[in-house]
Amino acid sequence: MKKYITIILAALLFMGCDDFLDIHPTGKIIAETGEEYRALLTDVYSRFPEDRGLTILRGDEMAADYKSLEGLDYDSYFDVWNWTDYNRNESSYYFNWRSYYHSCYIANYIIEHKNDITKATQKEINQLVGESYMMRAYVHFLLVNLYAPAYTHCEPETTRGIPLQMKADVNAVLKCSSVEQVYRQILLDVDSAALYLNVERWDNGLNYRFNTTTANALRARTALYMGDWELALAEAKKVVAKYPDLEDLNNTRSVLPTNYNSVESIMALEQVVTAKLLNIIVPDSNLIKIHDDNDKRLGKYYTSKLNADFVRVWSFRSRTPNNERCTFRAGEFYLIAAESANELDKKDEALAYIKPLIQKRYTVEGANEYSSLLETLGQDELREEIAKERQRELAFQGLRWFDLRRTTQPELVKVYPVSETESQTFILEQGDERYTLHFPSDAVAANPGLENWKE
Protein backbone atom coordinates (compact mmCIF):
# COMPACT_ATOMS: atom_id res chain seq x y z
CA MET A 1 0.00 0.00 0.00
CA LYS A 2 1.35 3.42 -0.95
CA LYS A 3 2.22 5.73 1.91
CA TYR A 4 0.87 9.21 1.25
CA ILE A 5 2.91 11.88 2.93
CA THR A 6 4.90 14.82 1.71
CA ILE A 7 8.35 13.39 1.21
CA ILE A 8 10.89 15.88 2.42
CA LEU A 9 9.34 18.26 -0.11
CA ALA A 10 7.09 19.62 2.58
CA ALA A 11 6.61 23.26 3.48
CA LEU A 12 9.54 23.03 5.85
CA LEU A 13 11.85 22.33 2.93
CA PHE A 14 14.27 25.20 2.43
CA MET A 15 11.92 27.69 4.07
CA GLY A 16 14.03 28.71 7.05
CA CYS A 17 16.02 31.92 7.25
CA ASP A 18 19.21 30.02 6.52
CA ASP A 19 17.84 28.26 3.47
CA PHE A 20 17.48 29.46 -0.07
CA LEU A 21 15.79 27.03 -2.42
CA ASP A 22 12.25 27.65 -1.20
CA ILE A 23 10.77 24.58 -2.84
CA HIS A 24 7.04 24.22 -2.35
CA PRO A 25 5.44 20.87 -1.52
CA THR A 26 4.71 18.73 -4.56
CA GLY A 27 5.59 15.14 -3.64
CA LYS A 28 3.00 12.78 -2.15
CA ILE A 29 4.55 9.36 -2.28
CA ILE A 30 7.38 7.70 -0.45
CA ALA A 31 8.48 5.59 -3.38
CA GLU A 32 9.31 1.96 -2.82
CA THR A 33 8.86 0.10 -6.10
CA GLY A 34 10.46 0.77 -9.43
CA GLU A 35 7.09 1.86 -10.77
CA GLU A 36 6.75 4.45 -7.99
CA TYR A 37 10.26 5.78 -8.51
CA ARG A 38 9.55 6.05 -12.25
CA ALA A 39 6.37 8.00 -11.44
CA LEU A 40 8.38 10.31 -9.20
CA LEU A 41 10.87 11.03 -11.99
CA THR A 42 8.10 11.37 -14.58
CA ASP A 43 6.53 14.06 -12.42
CA VAL A 44 9.84 15.94 -12.48
CA TYR A 45 9.99 15.67 -16.25
CA SER A 46 6.42 16.97 -16.55
CA ARG A 47 7.18 20.01 -14.38
CA PHE A 48 10.61 20.76 -15.81
CA PRO A 49 11.06 24.52 -16.45
CA GLU A 50 11.11 25.74 -20.03
CA ASP A 51 13.09 28.87 -19.32
CA ARG A 52 15.30 28.42 -22.35
CA GLY A 53 12.34 29.84 -24.25
CA LEU A 54 12.48 33.10 -22.31
CA THR A 55 16.03 33.67 -23.51
CA ILE A 56 14.55 34.17 -26.98
CA LEU A 57 13.08 37.44 -25.71
CA ARG A 58 16.36 38.48 -24.15
CA GLY A 59 18.53 37.91 -27.23
CA ASP A 60 18.51 39.19 -30.80
CA GLU A 61 16.18 36.74 -32.56
CA MET A 62 12.97 38.64 -31.85
CA ALA A 63 12.11 41.83 -33.74
CA ALA A 64 13.28 44.90 -31.85
CA ASP A 65 9.92 46.62 -32.42
CA TYR A 66 8.04 45.44 -29.37
CA LYS A 67 4.73 46.91 -30.51
CA SER A 68 3.59 43.44 -31.46
CA LEU A 69 3.14 42.66 -27.77
CA GLU A 70 0.39 45.18 -27.19
CA GLY A 71 -2.71 43.29 -26.15
CA LEU A 72 -0.76 40.05 -25.99
CA ASP A 73 0.24 39.78 -22.35
CA TYR A 74 2.61 42.72 -22.74
CA ASP A 75 3.32 43.16 -19.02
CA SER A 76 4.34 39.54 -18.62
CA TYR A 77 7.24 39.70 -21.07
CA PHE A 78 8.37 43.31 -21.38
CA ASP A 79 10.90 43.24 -18.52
CA VAL A 80 12.56 40.10 -19.88
CA TRP A 81 12.74 41.66 -23.34
CA ASN A 82 14.36 44.93 -22.17
CA TRP A 83 16.75 43.36 -19.63
CA THR A 84 15.04 44.78 -16.53
CA ASP A 85 16.26 42.49 -13.78
CA TYR A 86 15.39 44.72 -10.81
CA ASN A 87 12.10 46.40 -9.93
CA ARG A 88 10.26 44.25 -12.42
CA ASN A 89 6.54 44.42 -13.06
CA GLU A 90 4.80 42.19 -10.52
CA SER A 91 3.09 40.23 -13.29
CA SER A 92 6.29 39.72 -15.26
CA TYR A 93 7.45 36.24 -16.17
CA TYR A 94 11.02 35.57 -15.18
CA PHE A 95 13.58 32.82 -15.13
CA ASN A 96 13.05 29.94 -12.80
CA TRP A 97 15.15 29.01 -9.82
CA ARG A 98 12.96 27.14 -7.41
CA SER A 99 11.72 24.59 -9.95
CA TYR A 100 15.21 23.82 -11.22
CA TYR A 101 16.41 23.04 -7.72
CA HIS A 102 13.27 21.01 -7.07
CA SER A 103 14.17 18.85 -10.07
CA CYS A 104 17.71 18.50 -8.77
CA TYR A 105 16.45 17.56 -5.31
CA ILE A 106 14.35 14.67 -6.65
CA ALA A 107 17.28 13.50 -8.77
CA ASN A 108 19.42 13.39 -5.62
CA TYR A 109 16.69 11.53 -3.75
CA ILE A 110 16.57 8.79 -6.39
CA ILE A 111 20.36 8.50 -6.56
CA GLU A 112 20.62 8.17 -2.80
CA HIS A 113 17.85 5.55 -2.61
CA LYS A 114 18.91 3.41 -5.56
CA ASN A 115 19.56 0.42 -3.30
CA ASP A 116 16.08 0.68 -1.76
CA ILE A 117 14.11 0.29 -5.00
CA THR A 118 12.01 -2.89 -5.07
CA LYS A 119 10.06 -4.79 -7.73
CA ALA A 120 12.31 -3.69 -10.57
CA THR A 121 15.08 -5.32 -12.55
CA GLN A 122 18.63 -4.11 -12.07
CA LYS A 123 18.52 -2.75 -15.63
CA GLU A 124 15.41 -0.67 -14.82
CA ILE A 125 16.98 0.61 -11.61
CA ASN A 126 20.20 1.53 -13.39
CA GLN A 127 18.28 3.47 -16.03
CA LEU A 128 16.42 5.45 -13.37
CA VAL A 129 19.69 6.28 -11.62
CA GLY A 130 21.36 7.25 -14.90
CA GLU A 131 18.49 9.58 -15.77
CA SER A 132 18.74 11.14 -12.32
CA TYR A 133 22.45 11.86 -12.75
CA MET A 134 21.65 13.41 -16.13
CA MET A 135 18.85 15.47 -14.61
CA ARG A 136 21.21 16.84 -11.96
CA ALA A 137 23.86 17.60 -14.57
CA TYR A 138 21.41 19.30 -16.93
CA VAL A 139 19.88 21.41 -14.16
CA HIS A 140 23.30 22.66 -13.09
CA PHE A 141 24.24 23.27 -16.73
CA LEU A 142 21.22 25.49 -17.33
CA LEU A 143 21.58 27.34 -14.04
CA VAL A 144 25.28 28.12 -14.53
CA ASN A 145 24.54 29.43 -18.02
CA LEU A 146 21.76 31.66 -16.74
CA TYR A 147 23.08 32.85 -13.38
CA ALA A 148 26.87 32.84 -13.70
CA PRO A 149 29.34 34.54 -16.07
CA ALA A 150 30.12 32.66 -19.27
CA TYR A 151 33.01 30.23 -18.87
CA THR A 152 34.79 31.83 -21.84
CA HIS A 153 34.46 35.38 -20.45
CA CYS A 154 35.81 34.94 -16.94
CA GLU A 155 38.51 33.28 -14.90
CA PRO A 156 36.51 30.12 -14.13
CA GLU A 157 38.58 29.07 -11.13
CA THR A 158 38.10 32.40 -9.36
CA THR A 159 34.63 33.44 -10.55
CA ARG A 160 31.46 32.85 -8.57
CA GLY A 161 29.21 30.21 -10.13
CA ILE A 162 26.02 28.78 -8.65
CA PRO A 163 25.16 26.52 -5.70
CA LEU A 164 25.68 22.85 -6.44
CA GLN A 165 22.93 20.75 -4.92
CA MET A 166 24.50 17.35 -4.44
CA LYS A 167 22.36 15.86 -1.67
CA ALA A 168 18.69 15.55 -0.79
CA ASP A 169 19.28 17.28 2.53
CA VAL A 170 16.62 19.63 3.90
CA ASN A 171 19.08 21.13 6.38
CA ALA A 172 21.86 21.90 3.93
CA VAL A 173 22.80 25.56 3.58
CA LEU A 174 24.52 25.75 0.24
CA LYS A 175 27.03 28.27 -0.98
CA CYS A 176 28.15 28.92 -4.50
CA SER A 177 30.92 26.99 -6.15
CA SER A 178 33.25 28.54 -8.70
CA VAL A 179 32.31 28.41 -12.37
CA GLU A 180 35.08 25.86 -12.89
CA GLN A 181 33.79 23.61 -10.10
CA VAL A 182 30.28 23.69 -11.51
CA TYR A 183 31.38 22.71 -15.00
CA ARG A 184 33.61 19.94 -13.66
CA GLN A 185 30.73 18.57 -11.58
CA ILE A 186 28.47 18.59 -14.63
CA LEU A 187 30.99 16.49 -16.52
CA LEU A 188 31.47 14.16 -13.54
CA ASP A 189 27.71 13.63 -13.29
CA VAL A 190 27.50 12.89 -17.00
CA ASP A 191 30.28 10.32 -16.56
CA SER A 192 28.32 8.75 -13.69
CA ALA A 193 25.13 8.76 -15.76
CA ALA A 194 26.89 6.96 -18.61
CA LEU A 195 27.67 4.05 -16.27
CA TYR A 196 23.96 3.49 -15.59
CA LEU A 197 22.03 4.53 -18.70
CA ASN A 198 21.07 1.57 -20.87
CA VAL A 199 18.14 2.67 -23.04
CA GLU A 200 19.53 3.67 -26.41
CA ARG A 201 16.31 5.16 -27.80
CA TRP A 202 12.91 5.76 -26.32
CA ASP A 203 9.82 5.40 -28.45
CA ASN A 204 8.23 8.67 -29.57
CA GLY A 205 6.10 9.90 -26.71
CA LEU A 206 8.66 8.68 -24.19
CA ASN A 207 11.60 10.52 -25.76
CA TYR A 208 11.36 13.26 -23.15
CA ARG A 209 13.58 10.94 -21.08
CA PHE A 210 17.38 10.83 -21.07
CA ASN A 211 18.90 8.00 -23.12
CA THR A 212 22.47 6.78 -23.60
CA THR A 213 23.25 9.33 -26.33
CA THR A 214 22.22 12.28 -24.16
CA ALA A 215 25.38 11.73 -22.12
CA ASN A 216 27.48 12.38 -25.24
CA ALA A 217 25.21 15.27 -26.20
CA LEU A 218 25.48 17.10 -22.89
CA ARG A 219 29.24 16.50 -22.78
CA ALA A 220 29.56 17.98 -26.27
CA ARG A 221 27.46 21.06 -25.47
CA THR A 222 29.21 21.61 -22.13
CA ALA A 223 32.66 21.31 -23.74
CA LEU A 224 31.61 23.73 -26.49
CA TYR A 225 30.62 26.33 -23.89
CA MET A 226 33.96 25.80 -22.17
CA GLY A 227 35.92 26.19 -25.39
CA ASP A 228 37.27 22.66 -24.94
CA TRP A 229 37.37 21.93 -28.67
CA GLU A 230 38.93 18.48 -28.44
CA LEU A 231 36.25 17.14 -26.10
CA ALA A 232 33.44 18.92 -27.95
CA LEU A 233 34.53 17.42 -31.27
CA ALA A 234 34.99 13.91 -29.90
CA GLU A 235 31.58 13.85 -28.21
CA ALA A 236 29.72 15.54 -31.09
CA LYS A 237 31.11 12.92 -33.48
CA LYS A 238 29.73 10.17 -31.23
CA VAL A 239 26.31 11.79 -31.26
CA VAL A 240 26.30 12.13 -35.04
CA ALA A 241 27.39 8.51 -35.41
CA LYS A 242 24.38 7.40 -33.38
CA TYR A 243 21.94 9.94 -34.87
CA PRO A 244 23.15 10.59 -38.44
CA ASP A 245 19.72 11.29 -39.96
CA LEU A 246 18.64 14.84 -40.74
CA GLU A 247 15.25 16.11 -41.88
CA ASP A 248 15.42 16.85 -45.61
CA LEU A 249 13.57 20.14 -46.01
CA ASN A 250 13.49 19.60 -49.77
CA ASN A 251 10.99 16.84 -49.05
CA THR A 252 7.50 18.30 -48.65
CA ARG A 253 6.64 15.52 -46.20
CA SER A 254 9.44 16.39 -43.79
CA VAL A 255 8.54 17.63 -40.33
CA LEU A 256 10.31 20.47 -38.58
CA PRO A 257 13.65 19.32 -37.16
CA THR A 258 12.47 20.55 -33.74
CA ASN A 259 9.42 18.27 -33.77
CA TYR A 260 9.55 15.47 -31.21
CA ASN A 261 8.69 13.05 -34.04
CA SER A 262 11.63 14.23 -36.15
CA VAL A 263 14.30 11.73 -37.18
CA GLU A 264 16.73 14.19 -35.59
CA SER A 265 15.15 14.07 -32.14
CA ILE A 266 17.48 12.72 -29.47
CA MET A 267 15.60 14.07 -26.47
CA ALA A 268 12.38 16.10 -26.52
CA LEU A 269 11.84 17.35 -22.97
CA GLU A 270 11.45 21.12 -23.28
CA GLN A 271 8.74 22.88 -25.25
CA VAL A 272 10.87 25.95 -25.84
CA VAL A 273 8.43 28.00 -27.92
CA THR A 274 5.12 27.80 -26.09
CA ALA A 275 1.79 28.87 -27.57
CA LYS A 276 2.03 32.19 -25.71
CA LEU A 277 5.50 32.90 -27.02
CA LEU A 278 4.48 31.90 -30.52
CA ASN A 279 1.80 34.59 -30.42
CA ILE A 280 4.18 37.39 -29.50
CA ILE A 281 7.48 36.58 -31.18
CA VAL A 282 8.18 38.32 -34.45
CA PRO A 283 11.39 37.18 -36.22
CA ASP A 284 13.99 39.94 -36.35
CA SER A 285 14.68 41.34 -39.82
CA ASN A 286 18.42 40.73 -39.41
CA LEU A 287 17.72 37.04 -38.79
CA ILE A 288 15.59 36.87 -41.91
CA LYS A 289 18.28 38.63 -43.95
CA ILE A 290 20.93 36.00 -43.26
CA HIS A 291 18.77 33.44 -45.09
CA ASP A 292 18.97 33.41 -48.88
CA ASP A 293 16.29 32.30 -51.31
CA ASN A 294 17.83 28.82 -51.55
CA ASP A 295 17.46 28.23 -47.81
CA LYS A 296 14.43 25.98 -47.33
CA ARG A 297 14.19 26.93 -43.64
CA LEU A 298 12.94 30.37 -44.59
CA GLY A 299 9.71 29.03 -46.02
CA LYS A 300 9.47 26.11 -43.61
CA TYR A 301 9.60 28.17 -40.43
CA TYR A 302 8.42 31.63 -41.46
CA THR A 303 5.81 33.41 -43.56
CA SER A 304 5.41 37.07 -44.55
CA LYS A 305 2.92 39.63 -45.77
CA LEU A 306 2.82 43.33 -46.61
CA ASN A 307 1.36 45.60 -43.97
CA ALA A 308 -0.68 48.77 -44.57
CA ASP A 309 2.54 50.70 -45.19
CA PHE A 310 3.67 48.11 -47.78
CA VAL A 311 6.43 46.92 -45.47
CA ARG A 312 7.02 43.16 -45.45
CA VAL A 313 6.35 41.73 -41.99
CA TRP A 314 7.50 38.25 -41.02
CA SER A 315 5.88 35.83 -38.59
CA PHE A 316 6.00 32.15 -37.73
CA ARG A 317 4.31 29.73 -40.06
CA SER A 318 1.42 27.94 -38.38
CA ARG A 319 2.51 25.00 -36.24
CA THR A 320 1.45 22.97 -33.22
CA PRO A 321 3.55 24.24 -30.29
CA ASN A 322 3.11 21.10 -28.22
CA ASN A 323 4.87 19.11 -30.94
CA GLU A 324 7.89 21.43 -30.84
CA ARG A 325 9.89 19.83 -28.07
CA CYS A 326 13.61 19.84 -28.46
CA THR A 327 16.32 19.37 -25.85
CA PHE A 328 18.90 17.64 -28.05
CA ARG A 329 18.69 16.93 -31.80
CA ALA A 330 21.14 15.81 -34.45
CA GLY A 331 21.48 19.10 -36.36
CA GLU A 332 23.07 20.85 -33.39
CA PHE A 333 25.83 18.27 -33.15
CA TYR A 334 26.78 18.47 -36.81
CA LEU A 335 27.38 22.16 -36.07
CA ILE A 336 29.28 21.52 -32.83
CA ALA A 337 31.55 19.10 -34.69
CA ALA A 338 32.08 21.62 -37.50
CA GLU A 339 32.84 24.53 -35.16
CA SER A 340 35.18 22.49 -32.97
CA ALA A 341 37.05 21.02 -35.93
CA ASN A 342 37.53 24.49 -37.41
CA GLU A 343 38.89 25.83 -34.11
CA LEU A 344 41.36 22.93 -34.14
CA ASP A 345 42.39 23.98 -37.66
CA LYS A 346 40.91 20.84 -39.18
CA LYS A 347 39.12 22.45 -42.10
CA ASP A 348 38.42 19.26 -44.04
CA GLU A 349 36.78 17.70 -40.99
CA ALA A 350 34.77 20.87 -40.33
CA LEU A 351 33.47 20.83 -43.89
CA ALA A 352 32.68 17.13 -43.61
CA TYR A 353 30.18 17.94 -40.85
CA ILE A 354 28.65 21.16 -42.08
CA LYS A 355 28.11 20.05 -45.68
CA PRO A 356 25.65 17.22 -44.88
CA LEU A 357 23.53 19.70 -42.91
CA ILE A 358 23.60 22.19 -45.79
CA GLN A 359 22.48 19.48 -48.24
CA LYS A 360 19.34 18.95 -46.14
CA ARG A 361 18.52 22.62 -45.57
CA TYR A 362 19.10 24.22 -49.00
CA THR A 363 17.96 23.53 -52.51
CA VAL A 364 20.32 21.25 -54.43
CA GLU A 365 21.70 24.19 -56.39
CA GLY A 366 21.98 26.36 -53.30
CA ALA A 367 23.71 23.65 -51.30
CA ASN A 368 26.28 23.08 -54.02
CA GLU A 369 27.02 26.80 -54.33
CA TYR A 370 27.31 27.28 -50.58
CA SER A 371 29.52 24.20 -50.17
CA SER A 372 31.83 25.47 -52.90
CA LEU A 373 32.05 28.85 -51.18
CA LEU A 374 32.96 27.26 -47.84
CA GLU A 375 35.88 25.45 -49.45
CA THR A 376 37.48 28.79 -50.35
CA LEU A 377 37.35 30.21 -46.82
CA GLY A 378 40.13 30.53 -44.27
CA GLN A 379 39.68 29.64 -40.62
CA ASP A 380 38.35 33.04 -39.50
CA GLU A 381 35.91 33.31 -42.39
CA LEU A 382 34.71 29.77 -41.86
CA ARG A 383 34.19 30.53 -38.17
CA GLU A 384 31.85 33.37 -39.16
CA GLU A 385 29.91 31.16 -41.56
CA ILE A 386 29.49 28.40 -39.00
CA ALA A 387 28.23 31.00 -36.51
CA LYS A 388 25.67 32.22 -39.06
CA GLU A 389 24.62 28.66 -39.77
CA ARG A 390 24.09 28.10 -36.03
CA GLN A 391 22.01 31.28 -35.95
CA ARG A 392 19.83 30.04 -38.79
CA GLU A 393 19.62 26.39 -37.77
CA LEU A 394 19.07 26.89 -34.03
CA ALA A 395 16.82 29.95 -34.20
CA PHE A 396 14.08 30.12 -31.54
CA GLN A 397 15.30 26.99 -29.79
CA GLY A 398 16.63 28.64 -26.65
CA LEU A 399 20.30 28.39 -27.65
CA ARG A 400 21.05 31.72 -29.31
CA TRP A 401 21.33 33.66 -26.00
CA PHE A 402 23.89 31.14 -24.77
CA ASP A 403 25.81 31.51 -28.05
CA LEU A 404 25.87 35.28 -27.62
CA ARG A 405 27.15 34.84 -24.07
CA ARG A 406 29.93 32.40 -24.90
CA THR A 407 31.19 34.27 -27.98
CA THR A 408 31.29 38.03 -28.57
CA GLN A 409 28.57 39.26 -26.18
CA PRO A 410 27.67 41.99 -28.72
CA GLU A 411 25.80 45.23 -28.12
CA LEU A 412 22.05 44.80 -28.60
CA VAL A 413 19.65 47.68 -29.20
CA LYS A 414 15.87 47.43 -28.88
CA VAL A 415 13.27 50.11 -29.59
CA TYR A 416 9.79 50.24 -28.13
CA PRO A 417 7.26 52.62 -29.74
CA VAL A 418 5.46 54.43 -26.94
CA SER A 419 3.26 56.27 -29.45
CA GLU A 420 3.20 57.16 -33.12
CA THR A 421 5.86 59.80 -32.52
CA GLU A 422 7.78 58.64 -29.45
CA SER A 423 9.80 55.58 -28.59
CA GLN A 424 12.03 54.14 -25.87
CA THR A 425 15.44 52.71 -26.66
CA PHE A 426 17.00 49.97 -24.58
CA ILE A 427 20.68 49.04 -24.93
CA LEU A 428 22.60 46.01 -23.77
CA GLU A 429 26.20 47.07 -24.14
CA GLN A 430 28.92 44.76 -25.37
CA GLY A 431 30.01 42.56 -22.49
CA ASP A 432 27.19 43.99 -20.36
CA GLU A 433 26.85 42.47 -16.88
CA ARG A 434 23.21 41.73 -17.77
CA TYR A 435 24.42 38.89 -19.95
CA THR A 436 24.35 37.17 -16.55
CA LEU A 437 21.14 37.05 -14.52
CA HIS A 438 21.17 38.10 -10.88
CA PHE A 439 20.11 35.57 -8.27
CA PRO A 440 16.44 35.98 -7.28
CA SER A 441 16.09 38.65 -4.61
CA ASP A 442 13.84 36.48 -2.45
CA ALA A 443 16.41 33.68 -2.49
CA VAL A 444 19.19 36.07 -1.44
CA ALA A 445 16.94 37.57 1.25
CA ALA A 446 16.29 34.09 2.66
CA ASN A 447 19.99 33.27 2.67
CA PRO A 448 22.25 36.36 2.75
CA GLY A 449 25.29 34.13 2.31
CA LEU A 450 23.94 32.59 -0.87
CA GLU A 451 26.35 34.35 -3.22
CA ASN A 452 29.39 33.54 -1.09
CA TRP A 453 31.53 30.82 -2.55
CA LYS A 454 34.84 31.16 -0.74
CA GLU A 455 35.37 30.06 2.83
Image (tube, grey):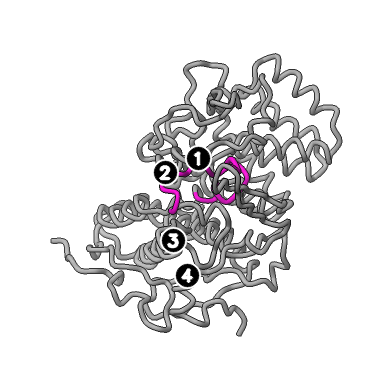
x then y, percent, for residue 214: 51, 46
Which numbered mark, 2 or 4, is in the foreground of this view?
Answer: 2
x then y, percent, for residue 391: 65, 38
Helix or strand or loop: what does disc 1 sit on? helix
Which numbered mark, 1 or 3, is in the foreground of this view?
Answer: 1
176 is within the stretch colored magenta: no
x then y, percent, for residue 86: 53, 67
Residue sitting at the far left: 1
What residue sits right under mark 2 in the picture?
A: 72
Mark 2 Cα shell of 10 Å, populated few (<14), some (14-19), many (≥20): some
> Disc 2 or 3, which lies upstream in sequence?
2
CB atoms at circles 2 and 1 under 8 Å apart? yes
Work out how far the residue at label 1 is from the one at label 4, CA to CA, in angstroms: 40 Å
Identity, as a three-letter code, of the amino acid under mark 1: Ser
Identity, as a three-letter code, of the amino acid under mark 2: Leu
Mark 4 Cα shell of 10 Å, populated few (<14), some (14-19), many (≥20): many
What residue sits right under mark 4 in the picture?
A: 165
Work out how far the residue at label 3 is from the one at label 4, CA to CA, in angstroms: 10 Å
Work out how far the residue at label 1 is from the one at label 3, CA to CA, in angstroms: 30 Å
Helix or strand or loop: what does disc 3 sit on? helix
Helix or strand or loop: what does disc 4 sit on? loop
The residue at 54%/23% (across/down) is 305
What residue sits right under mark 3 in the picture?
A: 100
Q: Which segment did they paint magenta?
A: 54-75
> Disc 1 or 4, which lies upstream in sequence?
1
Work out how far the residue at label 2 is from the one at label 3, CA to CA, in angstroms: 27 Å
The residue at 31%/54% (across/down) is 43
Tell me the quarter of the picture where residue 346 sits.
top right
Q: Is residue 440 above or below residue 75?
A: below
Tag of residue 68 = 1
Left or right of 3 in this view: 108: right
The residue at 37%/82% (across/down) is 16
